[in-house]
Image: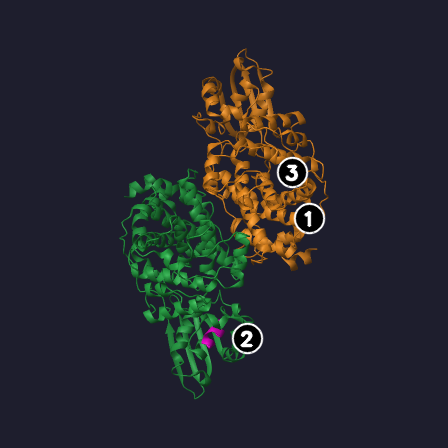
Chain colours: A orange, B green
Amino acid sequence: MTDHAAERGLTLRLAELAVALPVGERLHADVIAQAWADTIAVSAAAVGQQGLRDIRSAVLGQHASSLWLATGPQRADDAALLNGTAAHFLDFDDVSPSMPLHPSAVLVPALMAAESHGELRFDRFAEAFNVGSAMFRYIAEALPSEEHYGRGWHSTATVGRVAAVAAIARYRRLSAEVTANALGMASSMASGSRVNFGTMTKPLHAGLAARDALHAVEWSEAGVTASTTELESKGGFFSRFGTADAAGLAETVEARFTHWVEEWPSDWGLKRYPSCYGTHRPIDAALELRALVPAEQVARVEVEIYRGGSAPLTPRPPEAGTEAKFSLEYCTALAWLRGNVALLDFADAHFAADRAEVAALASRISLREVDGEGEFAHVTVFAADGGSHHRTVTLTKGSGGNPMGPSELQAKLRSCLEFAGVAGGERLLAGADGYSPEQDLIQIAAELRLETGS
Amino acid sequence: MTDHAAERGLTLRLAELAVALPVGERLHADVIAQAWADTIAVSAAAVGQQGLRDIRSAVLGQHASSLWLATGPQRADDAALLNGTAAHFLDFDDVSPSMPLHPSAVLVPALMAAESHGELRFDRFAEAFNVGSAMFRYIAEALPSEEHYGRGWHSTATVGRVAAVAAIARYRRLSAEVTANALGMASSMASGSRVNFGTMTKPLHAGLAARDALHAVEWSEAGVTASTTELESKGGFFSRFGTADAAGLAETVEARFTHWVEEWPSDWGLKRYPSCYGTHRPIDAALELRALVPAEQVARVEVEIYRGGSAPLTPRPPEAGTEAKFSLEYCTALAWLRGNVALLDFADAHFAADRAEVAALASRISLREVDGEGEFAHVTVFAADGGSHHRTVTLTKGSGGNPMGPSELQAKLRSCLEFAGVAGGERLLAGADGYSPEQDLIQIAAELRLETGS
């Protein structure tokens, strides 16, 4: 296999694996049902946001069109762009805990747009989603991810273009050659800057990745040529975006890709709270500790997190709801006071009404980075009566090793639909526990009846 | 100005310069008239190529649309994408001799698509083109260009997105803030791999750059936010794509940008021959030397070029017309035999008919790289009678320091229109010597009546 891999080249070998590796139609079906329902729900929640409506108006201009609906006059590339942007807009979409990736925000819109006949069977979606999920981890691990992300690249968007090409190619049952050509073309479109985090360009990255993957596949199918050795070449994807050794990758490609097809659910998680992922461990701890020390008896709280863990967080007291999502102290206090952290907590009216009370508790919460293994939060509460309690959280609630229970996931999905004010989500909610192979995902999404006017 | 620059940040300072630096409505008007006419002509020549038609069908699907025409149902972003791809398709578009840039293939389609009312006055086009041309050189020089290109980036596409944003912002008279926001957004779209050179994805890069610049401006105008310090930030454009020192750039930004607004025509050139730029110096020499030693009396020819000059060339005898464009020996022999190197020489039927004769002479031409200052070709011909003659070429025919004469430019433009089989180019040809300020470029392009069916 090693010789074969070297002979064919990494891009072609990855293309072969993407289109032909046996995956099993129902493999990871339960997890994929959750990922799909969660992505649709967080997208629906975003549709009412003015920023997303601004993007939609700018992209579509005067064209009548819709989000998330398969029928109607919209172009598939516009749908991929807008739906991907919607999926990532609230930063509430799923994650890959060990690598900075938001896989479903790219894969789900790309695959829904790639289905051109208007019916997307769950079993075929799941097969393609498995391939895309594996490719996401394979590429990010190989770069390697920390190096790539550390240089300023938004890996969801860069890696996402390559991963989504693999998923669409599997869905459309393309040849390895056409797929390799599309991978080479998508590599020339890979982009996305972390400096744009905190702006509307961040969610746009997920949409651009989904759109470009669709373009690369469709243009490749139409005969537009690209390099079929792009990824491994000197000056190619791994050379420009990372430090991977191309020869080393060629030796291990089959084993690592197969590993990730089997194991990606162990590096996957839903977000339980609509705040920065860096706030999730202290929130988990707060939700347990508040039963022992209610908010009114908290003297102070000490939070210790791993080195580098506060990089995405805002250190100052937030002055707006969108900023509060990045305040560990504010989010932890919110959880302690309310017993949950929800979308409405960051809406302007709710933030304004709750701010004084939450800020008072937040001011008694301190944060520092400490040495330690892996990613963690140590939370210690000192009560007014002199007692203290401690929790350490490593696996966030919602991650593969500490999953949300069915009722917790249902509560998240319902809260998203309520936030959006949409009706008709019964089959979406029911399916989060598992869709049947022949169910049509496009029809289920269409039942949401999202209000699409500007 | 230094303090001011540091205070405002590089992205904002560049945005201010782009929208407000006095340029002069007619500054460089003669050169810009040539650039515009040349870009339209080489684009027209490409419209009949099957590869470009494949791209058009893939992009537009069933939509009725046109290339280069301002009227009709097409979307401006599709027009930017397809026209940019057409402009670069034959690799016959203009160049920046000291940096690996094809400026007009991005700027012209972007500006034509940015005009949404259907009339593009030459004076306003020229003002915006000046700004875009300066930004192209400013960014490429600052990266610096060799470092950026050397790592595998196609600078026409990466730098082009930033340069075209500046041009469109000037054309639309945007504020510095909206322009800086658009620069930050375009920075998240900058991409393009040199590994894809030799495939149809290479010309696509120019079209993608024009389209993305248009999107970044229009989305920024619609309120979509991005970082307005993207270029200079750690992990920002210069950090990801080059090695520039952001503080140093801030100190010199006004002087260098102003320099390039005045001086870009000295680093600009038209391509006289539709072959790889690396073949142009030996062709220039051959066209002089053939008067002294006709082809039938050539015993052998020695060509010496600067170190690295053969990187883009193909070392083996070409087997197809498209490959022949990258064979220095073949192109030099062609010039010696025919007294010109023209589009038809690389068309399949002509290549097949001429191949044996040209290859026979090409086999007597040897090439090697030697040390020396700058970029050059030394060409020595040894005649059958024992005599020898020598020419050294540094400035290619068509570059700023050695421009084509009016009749040579007219001959190039006519050959492009003839190759395309289009009628109606009288005003295009007449204007290559200078358009009046109020002339509408969109109308002049529309007069070409390009055949747009598939």
Toward the viewer: A248 or A119? Answer: A119
Q: In this view, does B157 lie above or below B314?
A: above
Distance from disc 1 to disc 2, alpha carbons, whole Å, reads: 47 Å
Mark on residue A155? none
The location of residue A433, given as percent across then percent down, is: 69, 31
Decide whether residue B137 is among the magenta residues: no
Mark 2: which amino acid? Ala
The location of residue B119, given as percent across then percent down, is: 35, 52
- Asked if residue A2 shows in the view, the reply is yes
The location of residue B285, given as percent across then percent down, is: 39, 75
Residue at the spot of label 2: B352
**A7 to the left or right of B260:** right
Mark on residue A441? 3
**Region rendered in magenta:** B327-334
Same chain for mark 1 and mark 2? The answer is: no
What's the chain of the residue with tag 3?
A
Counting residues from the N terminus, which is met first, the one under dot 3 or under dot 1? 1
Q: Are marks 3 and 1 in contact (CB under 8 Å)?
A: no
Distance from disc 2 to disc 3, alpha carbons, whole Å, reads: 54 Å
Mark 1: which amino acid? Ala
Mark 3: which amino acid? Leu
